[in-house]
Amino acid sequence: MKLFIVVIALVAFQWQGSSAITCSYSCRKSYRTYGRCGVLGFSRCSSIAYRTDTCYRPCPVDGGWTDFTEWKEIKECDSLCGGGIKKEKRDRTCTDPAPAYGGDDCDGELSQVRNVACNTELCGDRCPLGQVKYIAHDGNKNKFYQCDNGVARLRDCAVGTMWSQDYTTCIHMP
């Protein structure tokens, strides 16, 4: 008979979340204590028991920038010779570390773009002064260079056309 009463007492002796002391708001280790008063539903305190749990709240982590990537060309040089400009870009991410647990995002630029001088050598005979001359683009059939005062400037053909060095104009694609 004693065993039966002990089992009932253990079942009735549940930890009550409503009587819990919540964890502190610090980001370190803190404790939560639960108390239980009364056994088997009686309103008077026939026994009091406490249980203490450890709880953790992570500290905020502010974001940190990675190093910038190497500069990459995003727009080719606008001249073949005689001096031009090309665009380059580099990126970084806010993952070193990534912001977490309410920490701040990184402050500053995600990417940078710059203009760089390119193909600064003189054109010479490739683009003689005072002459109209056209030069095919080596890597793109939709582009060509047009000589203008000793500088070979990059030009684009209209959509649906391609450069023909034989006709020195853009023609409709076959």
Image: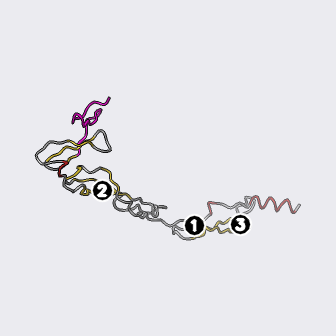
Discs 2, 3 touching: Cβ within 8 Å: no
Q: Is residue 117 above or below residue 134?
A: below
Q: Residue at x 32, y 44 (%)?
A: 139
**Name of the residue lying farthest toward the left:** 130
Q: Residue 170 in magenta?
A: yes
Please identify the quarter of the rendering in which residue 142 is found: top left
Q: Residue at x 78, y 61 (%)?
A: 9
Q: Amino acid at mark 3?
A: Cys
Q: CA distance from mark 2 to mark 3?
A: 73 Å
Region in magenta: 154-174
Q: Residue at label 3?
A: 45
Q: Position of residue 73 (x, y in %)?
A: 33, 53
Q: Amino acid at mark 2?
A: Val
Q: Residue at x 18, y 49 (%)?
A: 125
Q: Residue at label 1?
A: 56
Tell me if 129 is positioned left or right of 7 in this view: left
Quarter of the figure with the C terminus: top left
**Name of the residue lying farthest toward the right:** 1
Q: Residue at label 2?
A: 113
Mark toward the start of the polypeptide (3 vs 1): 3
Mark toward the start of the polypeptide (1 vs 2): 1
Mark toward the start of the polypeptide (2 vs 3): 3
Q: CA distance from mark 1 to mark 2?
A: 44 Å
Tell me if 127 is positioned left or right of 136 in this view: left
Q: Is residue 110 above or below residue 165?
A: below
Q: Position of residue 14 (x, y in %)?
A: 71, 60
